[in-house]
Image (cartoon, grey):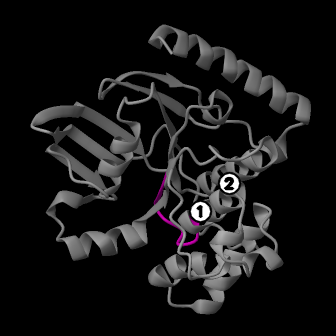
């Protein structure tokens, strides 16, 4: 069967224009009369086709950063542009429509709809962006199968799933509308090593096809998939580690891939030590 996962031309992560541009972004929350500054004067550019990873200590503002960059939450100050659109200028209805067509989300809280089957949970998102039901069903089934969700499980309801199964369904739901940017908040947090690898392989494939991935993770091995790792602490980007493109698995021997990952791991762990990880 011909793959339906990607329709874009692959982008060159080191030369392409930004798909996300954040300028002087701050985010403040008020709690019992006290102002909590979560993001502070943050500037960030994510290039089209890049696989960027955000790491940092708990409470650094990583999830808040994803919410602000994706339009799920508004910055207190500053501007955010996604796919050449100033999202702060959009009405709530227009912003919802924009996210529907341009953004995919993997949340820490999985948020599947209990009344819908696994397949229908995925289709509910895909059909909002693409009215061709046959095409969406084909794409949804293909993606679910690739992360180990068979046809019998696709007919189950969320309450019948393990935490790992639900997490994999949530990843597919984020990818089914073929978004410009995939925002992934700890996408392997509830998965064992086998299914973590399946999810990361899928994210790498859609990224290789031109979709941008912005992933938050605490897992160093997962972070090795990125072209660039950004370190967030106290609401600001404190440094970055450029890893470059990871070797495609189809073009190298298993030995070459292990050696490449070990080189990347040495560079990343050295960077994280400098950042005080």
Picture disc at residue 170: 1
In which quadrant of the rendered image does the N terminus lie?
Answer: bottom right
- Which element type, helix, strand or loop, lies under badge 2? helix
Identify which residue is drawn at 68% across, 73% down. Answer: 4
How many callouts does the rendering have? Answer: 2
**Range drawn in magenta:** 175-183
Mark 1 or 2: in front is: 1
The reply to whether the magenta stretch includes residue 196 is no
Query: Where residue 240 appears, x then y in whole percent?
Result: 45, 23
Are dots 1 and 2 in contact, CB under 8 Å? no
Q: Is residue 118 above or below residue 266?
A: below
* Residue 72 in sight from this viewpoint: yes
* Residue 7 figure quarter: bottom right
Mark 2 highlights which residue? Answer: 205
Query: Where residue 106 appears, x then y in whole percent?
Result: 52, 56
The reply to whether the magenta stretch includes residue 182 is yes
Q: Is residue 112 left or right of residue 240?
A: right
Q: Is residue 91 left or right of residue 222?
A: left
* Residue 119 figure quarter: bottom right
Which of the marked residues, 1 or 2, is nearer the chain's N terminus?
1
């Amino acid at each position: 069967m011909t793959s339906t996962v990607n329709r874009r031309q692959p982008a060159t992560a080191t030369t392409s224009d930004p798909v996300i541009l954040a300028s002087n972004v701050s985010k403040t929350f008020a709690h019992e009369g006290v102002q909590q500054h979560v993001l502070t004067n943050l500037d960030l550019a994510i290039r089209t086709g890049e696989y960027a990873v955000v790491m940092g200590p708990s409470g650094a503002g990583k999830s808040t950063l994803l919410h602000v960059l994706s339009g799920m939450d508004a910055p207190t100050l500053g501007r955010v542009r996604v796919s050449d659109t100033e999202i702060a200028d959009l009405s709530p209805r227009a912003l919802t429509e924009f996210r529907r067509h341009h953004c995919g989300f993997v949340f820490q809280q999985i948020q599947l709809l209990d009344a819908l089957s696994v397949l229908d949970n995925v289709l509910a998102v895909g059909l909002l962006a693409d009215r061709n039901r046959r095409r969406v069903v084909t794409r949804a089934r293909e993606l679910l199968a690739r992360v180990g969700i068979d046809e019998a499980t696709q007919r189950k309801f969320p309450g019948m799933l393990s935490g790992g199964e639900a997490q994999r369904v949530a990843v597919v739901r984020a990818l089914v509308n073929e978004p410009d940017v995939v925002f992934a908040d700890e996408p392997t947090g509830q998965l064992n090593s086998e299914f973590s690898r399946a999810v990361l392989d899928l994210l790498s494939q859609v990224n290789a096809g031109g979709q941008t991935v912005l992933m938050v993770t605490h897992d160093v091995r997962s972070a090795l998939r990125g072209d660039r790792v950004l370190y967030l602490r106290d609401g600001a980007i404190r440094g970055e580690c450029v890893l470059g493109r990871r070797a495609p698995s189809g073009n190298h021997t298993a030995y070459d891939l292990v050696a490449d990952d070990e080189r990347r791991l040495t560079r990343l762990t050295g960077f994280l030590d400098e950042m005080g990880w």
